[in-house]
Image (cartoon, rainbow, N blue to C red):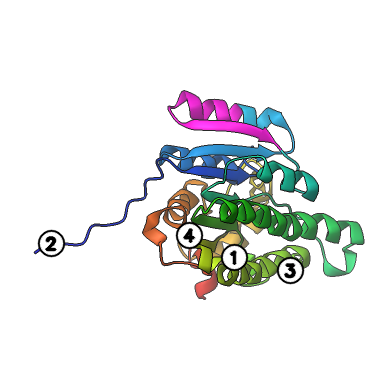
Amino acid sequence: MQLPSTPSLRLDGRRAIVTGAGRGIGVGLAAALAQAGASVTLVARTADQIDVVASAISESGGDAEAAVLDVADIGAVQRFFADRPAYHILVNNAGTNRPKPFLDVTQDDYDAVLDLNLKSAFFVAQACARRMIETDTKGSLIHIGSQMGHVAAPNRSLYCASKWALEGMSKALALDLAAHDIRSNIIAPTFIETPMTRPFFEDAQFRLTVLSKIKLGRIGLVEDLMGPLLLLASDASALMTGTSLLVDGGWTAD
C-alpha cells in the first residue's frame, strides 16, 4: 500500500513580498518565508529598517532584498509590480491603528486607518494579482487581519471597520481569482507583543483585561504567526481560499 505524502511547507524557488516588513510582525513573517526557502522582498516607506532586516536574513543564509515603496501611493504600487517578475506569495501586512472613542474620531483618523489598512491592501493585492495573471503564476495572497475583524472592542471603531472589511475583501478576491489558481486568505491574530505594542502592556489593567480574553493565558508572540503563514503560503493549503485563520488563543471562542 502506498501512503499519501504530506504536502511540504517548503517554499524553495518561490518569490514572496511582505509589506510593512521593517518591524514587529513583518520581520517575523519575512524571516519565516526566507527560512522556508523563499526569495523575499521586504517593503516599507523608508529603507533604514528593511535594510537591517534584509541583511539579517541574508547573514542567516536566506535570500532577501529591501525595496522602498509607499503602499499608500497607488501609482507607485502599480509601477512597482508591473516592473518586476511576478510574486508567488504576497503578505499584505502594512497597517496602522488610532484607538480612541468613536465620538472623538476625526476625518484625518478615518483616512489614516482605512486608507492604509484597506485601500492600500486592496490595490497592492490587485497589482500583485494582475502581474501573476499576466505571467500565468499561481500563488497565494495572505492578508494580515485581526481578531477585531471577527469581534469588536471599545475605542476600536476604525480598526474594526478596516479589519472586518478586509475579511470581506479577501473572500471576494478568493472568488475572483480562483480560476487563475490564486488563493486569498487571512491570518487574524490576537494582541501580539512587538516593540510597537509593548508599551500598551505596561498598563497593568489593560494587560489583565487582554489576558482575561485570551483563553490560553498569554500575549501572542510573532513566532505564533510564522507557522500559520507557512501553511497559507505553501502547498499544504492548496485547497484553502477565502478563509481566515484565527490565531487568537481562544479569544473569539467565548
Q: Which residue is mark 4?
A: 217
Which amino acid does the dot numbered 4 rest on?
A: Gly
Mark 1: which secondary structure?
Answer: helix
Q: Residue at x 52, y 68 (%)?
A: 178
User: If you read the primary sequence from the N terminus, does the residue marked by circle 1 or circle 4 appear first?
Assistant: 1
Q: CA distance from mark 1 to mark 3?
A: 12 Å
Q: CA distance from mark 1 to mark 4?
A: 16 Å
Name the amino acid, label 1.
Gln
Select label 1 or label 4 by which is in front: 1
The picture places residue 100, in percent across and down from the top left corner, at: 81, 61
Most foreground residue, 177 or 51: 177
* Element type at mark 3: helix
Question: Where is residue 215 drawn, in percent x and y?
Answer: 48, 66
Q: Amino acid at mark 2?
A: Gln
Q: Position of residue 127 (x, y in %)?
A: 67, 53
Q: Residues within 10 Å of mark 1 (few under 14, many from 20)?
A: many
* Quadrant in which the N terminus is drawn: bottom left
Residue drawn at (63%, 28%) of the image: 51
Up-down: is 43 above or below 101? above
Q: Which mark is residue 161?
A: 3
Within the magenta stretch, is there residue 155?
Answer: no
**Who's the residue at 44% across and 27% down the image?**
60
The residue identified by callout 2 is: 2
Q: Does the residue at mark 1 contact the one at mark 4 (Cβ under 8 Å)?
A: no
Instruction: Point out the frontmost of discs 4 and 2.
Output: 2
Q: Whole-Å distance between the Cαs marked 4 and 2?
A: 42 Å
Q: CA distance from mark 3 to mark 2?
A: 49 Å
Residue of label 1: 147
Q: Secondary structure at mark 4?
A: loop
Quadrant of residue 168 within the rendered picture: bottom right
